Image: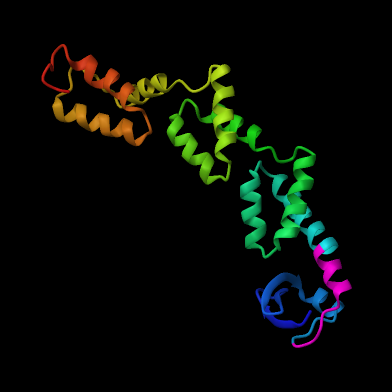
Amino acid sequence: MIVTGIEEVSRSRSKVCLEGDFAFVLYKGEIRFYGIREGEDLPEESCREILDELLPKRATLRCMHLLKDRAYTEGQLRRKLDMAGYPPCSIGRALEYVKSYGYVDDLRYALDYIQNQKEKKSRRVMECDLVRKGVPGDIIGEAFRRSQEENGPDEEALARKLLRKKHFDPQTADREQLRKMSAFLYRKGIGGQIIRKLIFTEALDINDDIV
């Protein structure tokens, strides 16, 4: 394959393009080792060695290094490897390896996240957080199902806790305070049914015109 471009991305690494398309990022010493020069042919054997051996191994080591400090989702690792210039085939091989040893488990990650955050965040907010972290929707749903079976997030209890922290009493609040607190809970991801129960319904005894 013809090398159509070599572009420096850092002092030690360069991006290599083959036949007009981005192929991979290599250290400059590796570029010299494989004799990669712009306008010249890269032998198929060398290309295969880079894509099937060198880069998958390096991507795997990168994953292991990241996972040493904290847990990651598969999606988070995929994004990090992609940003580092690893080709899709190398990323796939690296992720297969760490998943096969249980180092990456999106369901376990989601369950742990729900357990740690259930007294601070509503289900809706946690779902959005997990989506941003790259957890697939079906796994998020399964995690919440299992969490509920284990006495998972109680949205009403969370809402009551938030109201206590705000020193809010629906029996003494005026109309504007009720509406402001309703908006506050909504921003925290609390469902409308619970908001009505805790704020408006409990205030009806003395504010029967507020709905």
Image coordinates for residue 3, horizontal then vertical, percent: 75, 82
> Does 47 appear in magenta?
yes
The residue at 62%/48% (across/down) is 75
Q: Residue at x 16, y 11 (%)?
A: 205
Expressed as whole percent of the image width and height from the top left, the position of residue 96 reads: 76, 47
- From the top left corner, tell me how far across and down residue 38 is, in percent: 74, 86
Q: Residue furthest bottom?
A: 39
Residue 62 belongs to magenta span: no
Residue 36's place in the image compared with 195, above or below, is: below
Q: Could you say which quadrant of the image residue 181 lies in?
A: top left
Query: On the picture, is 105 further left or further right than 199?
Result: right
Picture residue at 20% right of the left edge, 26% below the top? 178
Count of numbered circles in the view: 0
Q: Which is more toward the observer, 22 or 119?
A: 22
Extent of the magenta region = 39-51
Q: Quadrant of the N terminus?
A: bottom right
Is most of the magenta stretch helix, strand or loop? helix
Position of 39 with respect to 122 (left or right) is right
Q: Is residue 77 above or below residue 198?
A: below
**Within the image, what quadrant is residue 177 found in?**
top left
What colouring style does the render use?
Answer: rainbow
Q: Residue at x 32, y 30 (%)?
A: 185
State whether residue 98 is above or below residue 119: below
Question: Where's residue 193, x and y in %?
Answer: 32, 22
Quarter of the figure with residue 179: top left
Image quarter where the C terminus lies is top left
Q: Is residue 188 left or right of residue 114?
A: left
Extreme residue in the right direction? 45
